[in-house]
Amino acid sequence: MSDNTNALDIVDLRAGYEASDVLHGMSLHVGANERVGLFGPNGHGKTTLLNTISRVIRPRAGSVRFMGEPIDKLAPHRIVGRGLIHLPQGNHLFPDMQIMETLELAAFTPRARQDMKDNLDYVLGLFPRLAERRHQPCKTLSGGERQMLSIGVGLMCAPRMLMLDEPTLGLSPKLKDELAEAIAEISRRGIPLMLVEQDIAFVLSLVERMYLVDHGEITREINRSADVDHQQIMDMYFGSEGAS
């Protein structure tokens, strides 16, 4: 990838379920090493967008390029193999599997296996609670610990970019702060991020740009350098929600 290539380029993306379109020609980009947030009302296409990028849902039109290469026709496991890692909301973990087993299983691609030891050391250093509980089954973890493990699983995949879907869902303010620190540390390694999140303050603490998703379209792009404050963004959000 050259220095001028975006990590992710999406042009006129359309997708949906059965006969209904949810995404109506979305276009956006994530620059190399950039952190980008998506916000907007529930049910307006944010999760569908991430599922379409990772090809859990097949796009009906448009293009998706990752590190300059088209991926919109690849199988999901091949997209993971390229290093684009999608962490869906809900902590989808095997409940009876131990933490260490879960982390080691995540390094299933050739790229990830090469760096498994270094990535494992990094994950356990980033989340000391996982190191302390490494032999416990996933079902014994708290909600915050499960979210830490989910992010750890993503890191074990040797990501070249991470997409996180509502990582703070159901977490306490203290755990949100801990998670924000961990995500900021991950981004300092040069890993681009796309973050879907309802907590506007959490997003603002982490990203450089934000997109407002409304009725399956990008209706606003907000640059942090433009001095848009929390209240203005909340007004955009609730104005959009009220119009739905």
Image (cartoon, helix red, strand yellow):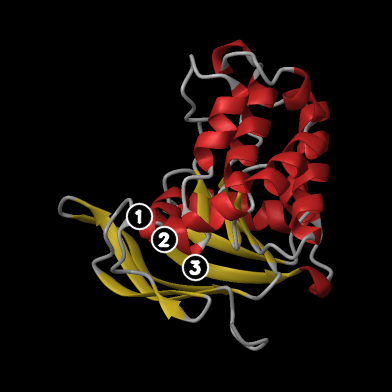
Q: Is residue 160 above or below residue 182?
A: below
Judge by depth and name the residue closer to the eye, 12 or 74.
Answer: 74
Q: Tell me which corner region of the image, top left, top right, bottom left or bottom right, holds residue 120.
A: top right
Judge by depth and name the residue closer to the eye, 96 or 144.
Answer: 96
Q: Is residue 243 above or below residue 59?
A: above
Point out residue 170 in the picture as x, y percentages from the top left corner.
63, 26
The N terminus - image quarter: bottom right
Q: Amino acid at mark 3?
A: Ile
| Residue located 64% across and 89% down the image | 4
Q: Amino acid at mark 1?
A: Pro
Disc 3 on helix, strand or loop?
strand
Point out residue 186 in the picture as x, y percentages from the top left corner.
75, 52
How crowded pointer 3 is (Cα within 10 Å; few <14, some 14-19, many 20+) is rated as: many
Q: Where is mark 1, residue-wise?
A: 76
Disc 2 on helix, strand or loop?
helix
> Do the residues under discs 1 and 2 have CB atoms within 8 angstroms?
yes
Using residue 159 as the reference point, say whether residue 18 is left or right of it: left
Using residue 9 as the reference point, say whether residue 117 is left or right of it: right
